[in-house]
Image: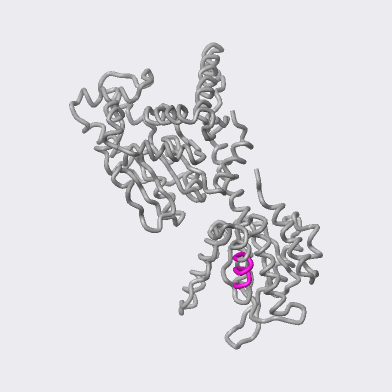
Amino acid sequence: MATKHQFLREYIKAIREGNAAVFAGAGLSRSSGFVVWKELLRPMAEDIGLNIDDEHDLTAVAQYVRNKSGNRAAINSAILEAFSKNVEVNENVTILTRLPIYTYWTTNYDHLLEEGLLAANRNSDVKIDYKQLSYTKRDRDAIVYKMHGDVDHAADAVLTKDDYVQYDRNHPFFRSVLQGDLISKTFLFIGFSFEDPNLDSILSQIRLLLDDHIRNHYCFMKRVKQTTEMTAEEFGYQKARQDLREEDLKRYGIQTVFIDDYSEITQMLREIEIAIRSNNVFISGSADFFNDNWTKVKIERLAYKLSNKLVKEGFKVSSGFGVGIGSSVINGALDEIYGSKFKHMDEHMCLRPFPQGIMDEDERKAKWRKYRESILSENGIAIFIMGNKKNYENEKVIADGCLQEFEIAKEYNCSIIPIGCTGDAAAKIYDAVKEDVAHFSYLEHYMDLLGTESDIDKIVDSVIEIAKTQRIIQ
């Protein structure tokens, strides 16, 4: 058994290192209104005189239906009817497809994973047929392997005993690809019953090859509880059966995370997303004008040192390329990346320059607002430096974009760090935070420094200390 803390620590680590994967079963789709396998087969089983609740081998039931009718028409029709309806993507799918996970496997026929990835502005490369395995979709952000088929190709869906027996012939290489992922990635099995013959065979082969060197994976299981309708003997049987299942899964490296209610899964996924975001830092600021206290050289030096040290400490820095500051943020990050991070730029820096050339002011404001929301939704920490710009008369004004980013950062529950001593928008944000410092308790011991300090190294060291307190490491 794995504790929740252990699971969160290890899976968050796998996501940050790019080694995480998801295996989605029917349970993941159930809260969106789709049926699980047993319910799909229930009416067809009744038609041939079987009670689905008394059956344990559901592939055999599907085969009996196929044998009785002489064709797959009833099965294909059931799949189309059950999985073609329009439903809402549930929160678990939404979070899983927002996370920076590259590999998704599923035995489901529905399109929830693809829809979730699309809503997260991620381009999915969906593999249904083995011929698609040799093709790579351009600009893909994630791969979705649908190893049992898709509702749009119901005639080829894997459901009956014959389908499983002939799986390697009709779906060659899928097992090999899954084997490779199970060896090299940390999987989260969610909504999965582990009664699938395909997966059982693959896991057994990996166990045979790697013995005790098999990689750890995780699954959720609802803890058996005694109800008022259940006798002590029935409860004892169910509990013993669950314990045996847990021990059996350990043979394959699958650690069970027990829950008392399915809502705990959603809460853990939320915690994972918050932890992933907490390692991402957005540096907001712009500077068309400078002063004696904060000259152009000094502001650029502050931005450079701050981003450089953030990357050195393992944070991922995001920048909107603000005037007067953005270049220094980028240079600071790049110098550290090229010096000690094996040039893995995407892991440590995200550049998000704003769309230009939009002449209509209302359209520009709307697009830039949406763009800011997109940036800040991916970051857990927002740092504010200076923040001024030229108006149409070339006069100095507060950068309203920085103030808007502050408001958006609050909406997304970002940890906010205003370097108020640099003035302008950062000073206004600092004043707002100071008036409500109880809601920013992590800043209480740093408020004086953030408001008055002029030494760059002291500011940078303090901001790094604050950021570390806000980074969630399970």
Please determine whether, in this image, residue 274 is positioned above or below residue 336: above
Q: Which residue is found at the position 39% from the left and 28% from the top?
A: 201
Q: Is residue 235 shown in magenta?
A: no
For the C terminus, the image quarter is top right
262 or 390: which is nearer to us?
A: 390
Which percent across, then down, holds residue 37?
37, 30
The image's colour scheme reads one colour
Exactly how many numbered labels are in the figure? 0
352 or 405: which is nearer to us?
A: 352
Please determine whether, in this image, residue 49 is positioned above or below residue 304: above
Residue span colored magenta: 327-334
Please determine whether, in this image, residue 183 is positioned above or below residue 368: above
Which percent across, then down, holds residue 92?
50, 43
Quarter of the rendering containing residue 165:
top left
Which percent across, then down, holds residue 203?
44, 30
Which percent across, then down, holds residue 340?
62, 58
Q: Is residue 410 left or right of residue 435?
A: left
**Magenta segment, principal secondary structure?**
helix
Of all residues, the one furthest to the left in this rendering is 70
Please determine whether, in this image, residue 198 is positioned above or below residue 18: above
Of all residues, the one furthest to the bottom in this rendering is 393
Q: Which residue is found at the position 53% from the left and 59% from the top?
A: 346
Quarter of the rendering containing residue 432:
bottom right
For the N terminus, the image quarter is top right
Q: Which residue is found at the position 57% from the left and 86% from the top?
A: 392
